[in-house]
Image (cartoon, helix red, strand yellow):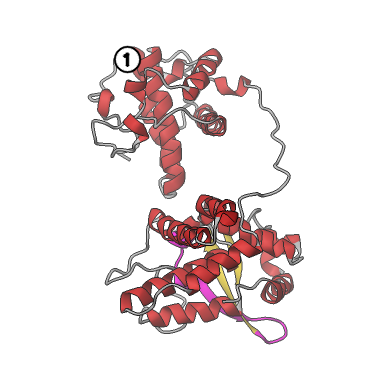
Amino acid sequence: MADSLLVPGPFEGLQLPSDLDGSHGHNRAVGKVAQIAAANDLQAIQAWLARFADTRTTFDNYRKEAERLYLWAVFQLGRPISSLTHEDFLVYQRFLADPQPRDKWVAGAGRKHPRGDPRWRPFYGPLSPASQRQAMVILNVMFAWLVQAGYLAGNPLSLSRHRTRRPKPRITRYLDADLWQEVKVYIEGLPCETDRQRAHYFRIRWLFTLLYLGGLRISEVGCNTMGAFFCRRDRDGEERWWLEVLGKGEKERLVPATNEMIVELARYRRECGLPPYPTAAEDTPLVLPIGKSRGPLTRAGLHAIVKKVFDGAAARLRLRGDAYAARADQLERASAHWLRHTAGSHMADRQIDLRSIRDNLGHESLKTTSQYLHSDDDARHKETEQKHRIGW
């Protein structure tokens, strides 16, 4: 965990005196048995972050917010985080909306630089209201844990007023049937003349099949393997394929692998020089890089593939004239997560039971007893098979 909190750029050589490192912070717990061995604030934050070391995205997001607060408290306020008060956090939230002085806190031109680069800064610009709320939620989680761990006496963020946010009336970041058809037509029109073009085509086709038919998150595509596919007989003796997905929050769920998905899987594997069906212990990534490497693609790499397809489909739409400009704009805004929303929306449009959609997408964790309800799983598989199709 040596890289838990790094402070390059204007924060080089962080050597803090005891009145700033938190070893004597005003909010330190007194008379309680500490559950962590941290002697100062930095060690306490590292102990908290260590819990998320196996979930890179969560770790990076949590580290970012902890680091920003730590640096602001020490260098802007001249106070360790273990001495921050409720009033300090009100000031900090205003700071998030406009980090000043800008040259000290904000990267030039909003560009991202490597953490070891002297041009690195904690911010790339002011945070939106949604990002401000997210930052405070993460910090509240951290402070609550530090109190529970016996490091802090109290959580100053617990005094904040929490407004109940009304859910949006509907999902808007998805592709309707016509736009989804445009994407599929664009993919089907990709060149396949050379071996490399064929490899690109079949990889794109398989990736979009996974994201749409499986409703997978892009992170789930990157971290799961083909060995998670398995086949079992339902109570009528019919063989049904499933994909066991390790998803957000380390939760597992079973995704129906419909006949269409298995046909696409076999086609993609043959193109990659693999047997048509995976074995149980197989560690082949769900989507492979093109070339000799057999390692998984990064999340950024998968995003780039999806965005390139959306951009290409949008450009194709624009060729039809100004009447299609708004639709093309919508496609250019789309991301991989839009495909997950598209899958859920299309399943709902086809009147798949909402409980099946919930379980397919993993919106809520399954109860422990659900592992015995194979008949419910089989009905969900059958309904998904009949009503949720990609139609290549």
Residue 133, percent from left and from top = 57, 30
Determine the residue located farthest toward the front in the rendered image: 321
Magenta stretch holds residue 224: yes
Query: Image height check: is 129 above or below 228?
Result: above
Q: Left or right of 77: which side holds 113?
A: left
Determine the residue located farthest toward the bottom in the rendered image: 237
Q: Residue at x 52, y 14 (%)?
A: 85
The amino acid sitting under disc 1 is Ser
Q: Left or right of 369: which side holds 93?
A: left
Q: Residue at x 41, y 56 (%)?
A: 304
Query: Image height check: is 62 above or below 13?
Result: below
The residue to which callout 1 is attached is: 18
Magenta stretch holds residue 294: no
* Secondary element at tag 1: helix
- Is residue 361 in sight in this rendering? no
Residue 123, percent from left and from top = 39, 30
Q: In the rendered image, which quarter contains the N terminus?
A: top left
Query: Image height check: is 73 above or below 265?
Result: above
Within 10 Å of disc 1 (Cα), the crowding (few <14, some 14-19, many 20+) is few
Residue 197, percent from left and from top = 35, 74
Residue extent of the magenta highlight: 221-238
- Is residue 334 in sight in this rendering? yes
